[in-house]
Amino acid sequence: GAVLGYACLSSQSNKRAVTDEEDKKLHRRCEECTPRPRTRRRSSAPSESLGKLVLPLFPPSGVVVGMDIGGTLAKIAICFSPTQTAMATRLKAYLDSQDSYGKTGRRDKKYDFQLDDGAAVVFVKYESSRTLEALELIKEHKLISPETSIGCTGGGAVMFKSAFRDQLQLGWNEVDEMQSLVSGIAFLIQHVPESIFAFDHSSEDAMATKKYLRVGSGARYPCLLVNVGSGVSILYLESSTDYRRVGGSSSGGATFFGLAKIISECKTWKEALDLARRGDSKKVDLLVGDIYGGHYTKLGLKADVIAAYFGKLARMDRGQVTKEDLVAALLKLITYTIGNTAFLYARIYEPKDVIFTGNFLRDNDLAKSKINFMVRRLSDGKINALFTEREGYYGALGAMLNAKHPEV
Amino acid sequence: GAVLGYACLSSQSNKRAVTDEEDKKLHRRCEECTPRPRTRRRSSAPSESLGKLVLPLFPPSGVVVGMDIGGTLAKIAICFSPTQTAMATRLKAYLDSQDSYGKTGRRDKKYDFQLDDGAAVVFVKYESSRTLEALELIKEHKLISPETSIGCTGGGAVMFKSAFRDQLQLGWNEVDEMQSLVSGIAFLIQHVPESIFAFDHSSEDAMATKKYLRVGSGARYPCLLVNVGSGVSILYLESSTDYRRVGGSSSGGATFFGLAKIISECKTWKEALDLARRGDSKKVDLLVGDIYGGHYTKLGLKADVIAAYFGKLARMDRGQVTKEDLVAALLKLITYTIGNTAFLYARIYEPKDVIFTGNFLRDNDLAKSKINFMVRRLSDGKINALFTEREGYYGALGAMLNAKHPEV
């Protein structure tokens, strides 16, 4: 099998397998172009920008695949070499010929991007429970040959490994979920336009405007990465390879949806968010002004600050409130708690930036905007809250970046 | 009217009004016996114990009263001089003759305490909406004479001031709520046995055992005071008079009760807590083990750690869960979030102790035990979580300590 190697982005289309000697040099070179500041305190030194991230060398098939087979959805990122190969051409033609594949497979065309040297990355998702059908489809259309580099993350990375090996002779390396996430985000921020943004300031219940950051200047190390999935994990990143989980909380996306189902009998995420958008949380939240008749000046609490989420309900009956208002208050509870938690971690770790990401925030500008509001309010605008796009695909993209050519 | 003055506890039964000159000296003396460490960093210096707190001098009536007229309940603390007076004797006889007064007035005899020199403090509560009836009752039985020192806090301190002045010739000074709280707690900790305790360590869902701290050695400055009422306020105390609000959160007692009413249709706090006690939160919470099939070792997350409160509901129907399990999960969400928030503030402010108090924790060892579990788990047992008794009466007690004799 090929010796594993990495190359800086400018040489990514090099298809020749590297020697051990070259591999060492390449690794060193990549470490050199990834600054790793060790200090945890904010200093006046010039900001370090995110280090350059690298794609794996293209294998003989000309294709690198990253898969993230999660509990519900499986996400796939596919990178095509600028140099055409028979398999790459066949796979690309198949993907371009339609927008859906099998029963639940869907192309996410809006997320396509191309790198400077012509390599192209495309994204596909399907329901994880259909993984064996996906395997059949790959077999039937001869979409992926064994000369392909594949990285896989998520629970399915272990569960489906033998099926792919036995039936398709496809091997993959298992990539740690957090490593996938960090690699995927860092790569997008560094190389792909409109991947990271801040919000303009806005009032509490208005949607703020996005300001995309210039490619390559998106975020600065050290940073905190707040990953809002089912729960919340907070990572401290000194670089895209040097990070650790420093904390988290258990009030995340699944808490929102789980409780929303109970209090509103909604069936889907979209329905829950639509309810939240239409509701007025002030009908159920207890505000400082409700208690003190105005600002509580001595403690510096303004009248419109929430004293207790759902606090007005303590003296109301269920019949007096709408499910819209309840779900709107629930979304505030979840997003403001995330904002508060991130604010406190930022005070402890003093990062240059705080990046919010994760599946709960995918296509969810409402939640992003509320987190932004809370972080700004708590930090008097001092914390630079950044948000990302393409949330669903970081794991797949990171698995792709960490893909290794199988030792056949 | 009398010149206002304070005396150290040992001279509290001194009934003579002090001169301005004496007043200054007494103030200085009291400041001297209240150590005020200024450092915010943990040091190896010997711990400072809580400073001595003082009662106001007794006025001619021999009685000092503190009232806390809140949104729902009014609480009264009454301190009797060891030296008998006609009014004190009459009031004491009336209070001792029965356990309830008017429609909602109740004596809380279990909270009675006596100070070293024989002064006695007793507690009464009633529903705030009955305040004018309480006034009539005081008038009818001639319970409180104008020569009484009264301090009052809570929203009713302003609302009912003129009624008491016009109909009973009783005046009071308005005491800030936070000052009342801090004074009341600090006094109890310093002077009254079984007021503050730590828990023995316990497993997650077992009740821990209380270990009461010796009077006078209860807590050390600087400390964090986490006050869990409708919402949560976090105060940083350098002494009982030198404190500031450093933060808080809006997930408090009213959030618990408000949401509990929605998800279980319970009607009372007691009912909500009973449901929580009987329920099994693991039926609805998503655990790390549910996602990864065991520990997530690389991130140091044990299998039994909650990944997302209510997270299992994302794939369940309402009919598959009991209201007991839902309210049990809700109590964990609220108490663990309080524990997590306090843990983060403790990392920022590095206090010697963290004291949890507030009306939500009154007669609520279940919630206290869960907060304790979370703080211990997060801090690896390093944070000294302390809990208090008599939560409902701190405001009244603090108002009593800050009572001033009216300038008639």
Image (cartoon, coloured by chain):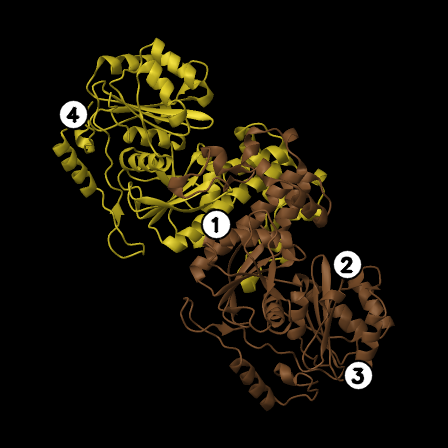
Chain colours: A yellow, B brown
**As shown in the figure, which amino acid type bears the numbered disc 2?**
Ser
Mark 3: which secondary structure?
loop
Mark 1 crowd level (few <14, some 14–19, many ≥20, 10 Å Cα): many
Mark 2 crowd level (few <14, some 14–19, many ≥20, 10 Å Cα): some
Residue where numbered disc 2 is placed: B129
**Chain for mark 1?**
A
Residue where numbered disc 1 is placed: A340
Q: Write the residue at 66% across / 47% down.
A: B257
**As shown in the figure, which amino acid type bears the numbered disc 4?**
Ala
Alpha carbon separation for disc pair 4 and 1: 49 Å
In the image, taking residue A51 as reference, residue B147 lies left or right, namely right
- Callout 4–callout 3 Cβ contact below 8 Å: no
Alpha carbon separation for disc pair 1 and 2: 36 Å
Mark 2: which secondary structure?
helix
Alpha carbon separation for disc pair 2 and 4: 83 Å
- Callout 2–callout 4 Cβ contact below 8 Å: no
Q: Nearer the viewer, mark 4 or mark 3?
A: 4
**As shown in the figure, which amino acid type bears the numbered disc 3?**
Thr
Q: Write the residue at 57% across / 41% down.
A: A330
Residue A61 placed where, x, y %? 23, 18
Residue where numbered disc 3 is placed: B85
Which mark sits nearer the N-terminus, 2 or 3?
3
Alpha carbon separation for disc pair 2 and 3: 31 Å
Alpha carbon separation for disc pair 4 and 3: 100 Å
Q: Nearer the viewer, mark 2 or mark 4?
A: 4
